[in-house]
Image (cartoon, helix red, strand yellow):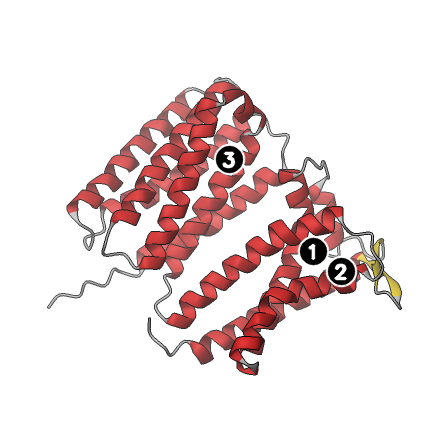
């Protein structure tokens, strides 16, 4: 019997597309004052990534002919939109918004194709449905409310690139064990929890005694449930996820503020301070209740780098130990 396992290279391409899309999304957020031409260039990158994924779907022999044809059709439409972008460099912002809407509509339809394919694992179908609905919703907003979309084109493009990157990473990683699938779900939850919920708290509700002690407890609280129900054998997972939330807070809260809550912070300068490049400059005072102390740029940077190393080591160890149970 011939093997039905897909080759490894599409997974590598998916991961690469995911990483590049997320980096492009960060570039957009870091530079919210980009003009129309630069935004069009970034949208071009997004279309290139998605066109590659659609043609990969069309060439996947393990898929049914219908889904392969839909992938090729989506790729052809994306190439047409790419051509319009390249040969219409002087388009206005309103026209660019409509191009963004068309792009997201194509992405939404092709995502639904993956959801309808019975041969895909349930986690991939669920992810495809979620992303497809998101793209179609954003496309509808851009098409039906062009005035609102013109104001929020940067946010639309950022969500487009971020969602593309996320689904590509998940498809590339393609967890094949119960532990792998659990880890992907928990990491995604930790990222969303840290980026949206914790950052919202930190932006608006940071004036209470012992604030940073409460903030640390907020990082860890959702994952204490793992210890309660699974025992101490999963302490590495609980701790690493709590630390991951803390990293989303320390390197992401002004990203959240600028993108979602109307803050206007120079993110490059702020990141320099968070990552230790401003030396002994005091960034804020740690409020520990019974003890307070100044946090310098270099201290914050060292803290972030140390947490990145600990999260990577603990997640890798948990993966190796727990990844023996097949789905």
Q: Residues within 10 Å of mark 3 (few under 14, many from 20)?
A: many
Relative to 233, is 242 on the left or the right? Answer: right
Residue 121 sits in quarter: bottom left
Q: Read off the residue under disc 2.
A: 300
**Label 2 close to label 1 by CB (< 8 Å):** yes
Tell me the residue at 79%/56% (across/down): 297
Q: Nearer the viewer, residue 300 or 242?
A: 242
Residue 157's label in the rendered image is 3
Secondary structure at badge 3 equals: helix
Q: Nearer the viewer, residue 129 or 68?
A: 129
Cα gap from disc 2 to disc 3, whole angstroms: 31 Å
Q: What percent of the width, then of the height, locates residue 100?
A: 44, 29
Q: Read off the residue under disc 1.
A: 250
Tell me the residue at 50%/57% (across/down): 188
Secondary structure at badge 1 equals: helix
Mark 1 vs mark 3: which is more N-terminal?
3
Q: Residue furthest left?
A: 1
Q: Quadrant of the N terminus?
A: bottom left
Report how many numbered discs are placed on residues in the image: 3
Q: Is residue 16 above or below residue 313?
A: above
Q: What percent of the width, then of the height, locates residue 125?
A: 33, 53
């Amino acid at each position: 019997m011939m093997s039905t396992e897909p080759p490894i290279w599409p997974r590598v391409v998916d991961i690469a597309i995911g990483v590049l899309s997320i980096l492009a999304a960060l570039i957009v957020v870091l530079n919210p004052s980009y003009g129309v031409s630069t935004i069009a260039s970034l949208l071009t990158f997004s279309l290139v990534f998605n066109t590659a994924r659609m043609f990969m779907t069309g060439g996947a022999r393990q898929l049914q002919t219908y889904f392969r044809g839909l992938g090729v059709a989506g790729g052809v439409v994306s190439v047409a939109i790419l051509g319009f972008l390249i040969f219409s460099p002087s388009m206005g912002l309103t026209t660019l918004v409509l191009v963004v809407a068309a792009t997201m509509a194509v992405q939404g339809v092709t995502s639904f194709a993956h959801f309808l394919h019975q041969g895909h694992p349930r986690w991939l179908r669920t992810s495809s449905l979620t992303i497809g609905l998101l793209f179609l919703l954003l496309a509808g907003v851009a098409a039906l409310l062009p005035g609102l979309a013109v104001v929020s084109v940067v946010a639309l493009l950022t969500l487009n690139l971020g969602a593309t990157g996320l689904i590509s990473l998940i498809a590339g990683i393609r967890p094949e064990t119960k532990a792998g699938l659990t880890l992907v779900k928990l990491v995604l939850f930790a990222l969303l929890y840290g980026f949206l919920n914790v950052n919202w708290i930190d932006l608006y509700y940071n004036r209470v005694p012992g604030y940073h002690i409460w903030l640390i407890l907020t990082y860890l609280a959702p994952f204490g449930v793992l210890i309660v129900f699974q025992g101490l054998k999963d302490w590495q997972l609980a701790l690493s996820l709590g630390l991951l939330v803390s990293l989303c807070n320390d390197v992401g809260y002004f990203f959240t503020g600028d993108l979602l809550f109307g803050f206007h912070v120079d993110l490059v300068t702020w990141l320099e301070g968070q990552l230790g490049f401003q030396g002994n400059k005091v960034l804020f005072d740690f409020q520990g209740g019974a003890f307070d102390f100044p946090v310098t740029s270099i201290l914050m940077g060292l803290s972030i780098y140390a947490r990145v190393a600990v999260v990577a080591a603990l997640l890798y160890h948990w993966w190796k130990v727990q990844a023996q149970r097949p789905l």
